[in-house]
């Protein structure tokens, strides 16, 4: 198996782990407070990564540390909005497709922050995503439910994080940046939980098991595999593969929770997926066409 094929396989596994994280998280917050769960999950995940980037953390300068922490604040905001949306939602698959809109929000954020105009294909793909959201609202007018609004806000914060993370990743080692972000996200979760949530008197082993799987599988292992996979493949190829996450989430939620998806929601999710494929796949398709012409 070539390095490229191995990388593609690793990224497919990554999308499966990410989608499984939706199930792990929903099961855990049936007992644990949502913000507290995120706090424990991400602090523990950062501690698992710590031995692999300990020396890098000691040598990082103060300015880079502040920059990495600020990126972590945006990641933390996105994750906390996401977990709150899950606690309010009846459909994980629908939420996963809304969260995938962060890929389309990212070029707009880049335009606003760094004055880089989105490519033409972005404006062509955007209407499909908007129509898809309207279909997900299950009406002919713009009327998103509460959980859908939280998912949209989480996707927007994730788009901001994506841009800032790309900027600082050029200056800070990957594992160091990841460890700091995970830790900051965990601290934010614990801080919010202390002031707004009440913890149960007893927590069963099953709940701790869901937390452990969230930490080890859906966070630490997922991010490690994603980094390894991206090293040996193109950005366009990785982007297309990562679109599989909401698809796997829909399948897992139907298998685990017997969630059903009506025709209107199916059309909405399909339009969002089409929008992402048009936007993220256009570069690769164009490259293939040029290669065949040569």
Image (cartoon, grey):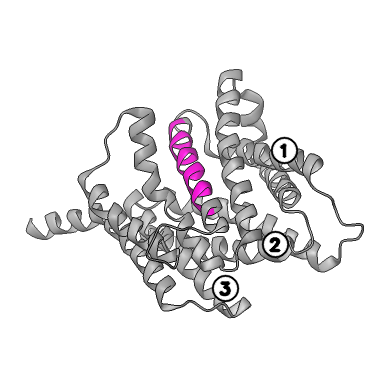
**Is residue 228 among the parts visible in the rendering?**
yes
Q: Work out which quarter of the rendered image holds the N terminus and state it.
A: bottom left
Q: State how far apart marks 1 and 3 are (Cα).
A: 29 Å
Q: Residue furthest front?
A: 141
Disc 2 + disc 3, Cβ < 8 Å = no
Q: Main secondary structure of the magenta part?
A: helix
Q: Which mark is residue 213?
A: 2
**Mark closer to the chain start, 2 or 1:** 1
Taking depth in this image into account, of 53 and 216 the one nearest to the observer is 216
The x, y position of residue 92, in whole percent, is: 56, 66
For marks 2 and 1, give the one nearer the viewer.
1
Q: Quadrant of residue 281?
A: bottom left
Q: Which residues are magenta?
A: 151-167
Tag 1 residue: 187
Secondary structure of the residue carrying numbered label 2: helix
Q: State how far apart marks 2 and 3 are (Cα).
A: 17 Å
Residue at coordinates 60% horizontally, 25% vertically from top-left?
Answer: 65
Image height check: is 173 above or below 79?
Answer: above
Secondary structure of the residue carrying numbered label 1: helix
Taking depth in this image into account, of 6 and 115 the one nearest to the observer is 115
Secondary structure of the residue carrying numbered label 3: helix
Disc 1 + disc 3, Cβ < 8 Å = no
The x, y position of residue 33, in whole percent, is: 77, 54
For the residue carrying disc 3, how many other residues have a C-alpha within 10 Å: few (<14), some (14-19), or many (20+)? many
Q: Residue furthest top?
A: 62
Q: Which mark is residue 253?
A: 3
For marks 2 and 3, give the one nearer the viewer.
3
**Mark closer to the chain start, 1 or 3:** 1
The x, y position of residue 112, in whole percent, is: 36, 31
Q: Residue furthest left?
A: 293
**Is residue 9 among the parts visible in the rendering?**
no
**Mark closer to the chain start, 2 or 3:** 2
């Amino acid at each position: 198996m070539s390095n490229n094929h191995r990388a593609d396989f690793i990224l497919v596994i990554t999308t499966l782990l990410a989608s499984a994280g939706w199930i792990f998280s929903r099961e855990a917050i049936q007992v644990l407070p949502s913000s507290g769960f995120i706090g424990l999950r991400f602090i523990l995940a950062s501690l698992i990564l710590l031995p692999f980037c300990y020396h890098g953390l000691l040598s990082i300068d103060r300015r880079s540390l502040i920059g990495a922490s600020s990126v972590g604040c945006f990641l933390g905001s996105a994750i906390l909005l996401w977990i709150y949306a899950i606690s309010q939602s009846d459909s994980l698959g629908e939420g996963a497709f809304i969260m995938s809109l962060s890929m389309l929000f990212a070029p707009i954020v880049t335009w606003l922050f760094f004055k880089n105009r989105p490519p033409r294909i972005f404006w062509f793909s955007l209407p499909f995503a908007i129509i898809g959201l309207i279909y997900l609202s299950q009406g002919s007018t713009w009327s998103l439910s509460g959980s859908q609004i939280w998912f949209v806000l989480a996707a927007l914060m994730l788009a901001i994080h994506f841009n800032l993370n790309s900027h600082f990743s050029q200056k800070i080692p990957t594992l160091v940046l990841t460890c700091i972000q995970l830790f900051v996200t965990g601290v934010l979760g614990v801080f919010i939980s202390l002031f707004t949530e009440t913890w149960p008197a007893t927590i069963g082993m099953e709940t701790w098991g869901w937390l452990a799987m969230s930490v080890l599988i859906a966070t630490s292992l997922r991010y490690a595999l994603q980094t390894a996979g991206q090293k040996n493949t193109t950005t366009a190829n990785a982007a297309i593969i990562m679109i599989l996450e909401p698809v796997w989430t829909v399948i897992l939620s139907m298998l685990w929770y017997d969630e059903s998806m009506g025709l209107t929601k199916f059309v909405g999710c399909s339009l969002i997926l089409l929008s992402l494929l048009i936007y993220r796949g256009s570069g690769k398709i164009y490259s293939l066409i040029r290669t065949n012409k040569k």
